[in-house]
Amino acid sequence: MSQPAYTVVGTPFSTFTRTITLGLQYKGLEYNQLATPPQTELALENHPFGYLPTLIIHELELEGKRVTQDIKLRESQAIVRFIDRVAPEPSLHMEGGTGGVVLEEKMWEFVSFVASFGFPSMEGGVVKPQVKALDEGKQTDAEVRQSIASGVEQTRKFLALAESLMVNSSDYLFGDHPTWADFFLFPIMADLRMVPEWKEVVSERLVRWMEKMDGLEAVKATKEGTLSVGARP
């Protein structure tokens, strides 16, 4: 049996790594995964700054010819564009006009909001400090809550914005099937769901969306090794 055409470098604990594996799973592309945290020797070998994820492309057809030289593709938004090119179906895009959203680029705007604002507020401002405090057990609940108060408020504001951008009466963020917007937001939300602040900041609509996402086979296939099952980096 030949090896898969792709290798993902990144721990399942990494939210953006999970975004990539969600897409690969959803599109039925086989891959190996080298689980490593950021800034390790392996991460630095594959990304100039030691970040995650990297997609190593072992086989690729260019102009009708098969290329077998390993190509390293870094940065999540570059990787998802490649995945879409080699496997356009099933689509992870929205069509312009869906639910009144005129431009399909609004989905990419949402993705950028998640990466630039949602990730630092939810992960850096709430999840990571809360999990660290729970693991170490050195602070009281009151001390932890005080230390993350700003992150909680920023998370609340971000999620209100995210909900305002969702298509009305849809199962997913931008219609009746998942898009890359769902796959960028879900891993971060899955982490947030594991800390007490979840109930303070999430709306009923986002809870229903999470439940819909939980039913996807791609989500089930990428759950191992994440905070959702109590894992650590």
Image (spheres, rainbow, N blue to C red):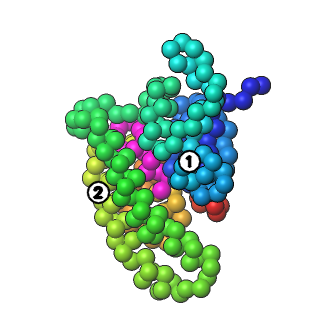
Residue 228 found in image quarter: bottom right
Q: Is residue 223 visible?
A: no
* Residue 214 picture location, percent across and down: 53, 48
Instruction: State the residue at coordinates (54%, 65%).
Output: 194
> According to the image, label 2 marks what residue?
161
Between residue 154 and residue 78, name the one nearer to us: 78
Residue sitting at the far right: 1
Instruction: State the residue at coordinates (52%, 60%).
Output: 191
Instruction: State the residue at coordinates (51%, 56%).
Output: 190
Instruction: State the residue at coordinates (59%, 57%).
Output: 38
Helix, strand or loop under label 1? loop
Q: How crowded is the residue under tag 1: few (<14 C-alpha within 10 Å), some, or many (20+)?
A: many
* Residue 180 picture location, percent across and down: 42, 40
Q: Which range of residues does the magenta coloring cover? A: 173-188
> According to the image, label 1 marks what residue?
47
Q: How crowded is the residue under tag 2: few (<14 C-alpha within 10 Å), some, or many (20+)?
A: some
**Residue 177 on the magenta segment:** yes
In the image, residue 114 above or below residue 196:
above
Looking at numbered disc 1 in the image, what kind of residue is underneath it? His
Tally of numbered discs: 2
Between residue 117 and residue 25, name the one nearer to us: 117
> Are the residues tagged 2 and 1 within 8 Å (C-beta)?
no
In the image, residue 195 above or below residue 115:
below
Residue 158 found in image quarter: bottom left
**Would residue 28 appear left or right of 182 to someone viewing this image?**
right
Between residue 113 and residue 179, name the one nearer to us: 113
* Residue 148 picture location, percent across and down: 43, 76
Q: Is residue 132 visible?
A: yes
Looking at numbered disc 2 in the image, what kind of residue is underneath it? Leu
- On-image quarter of the N terminus: top right
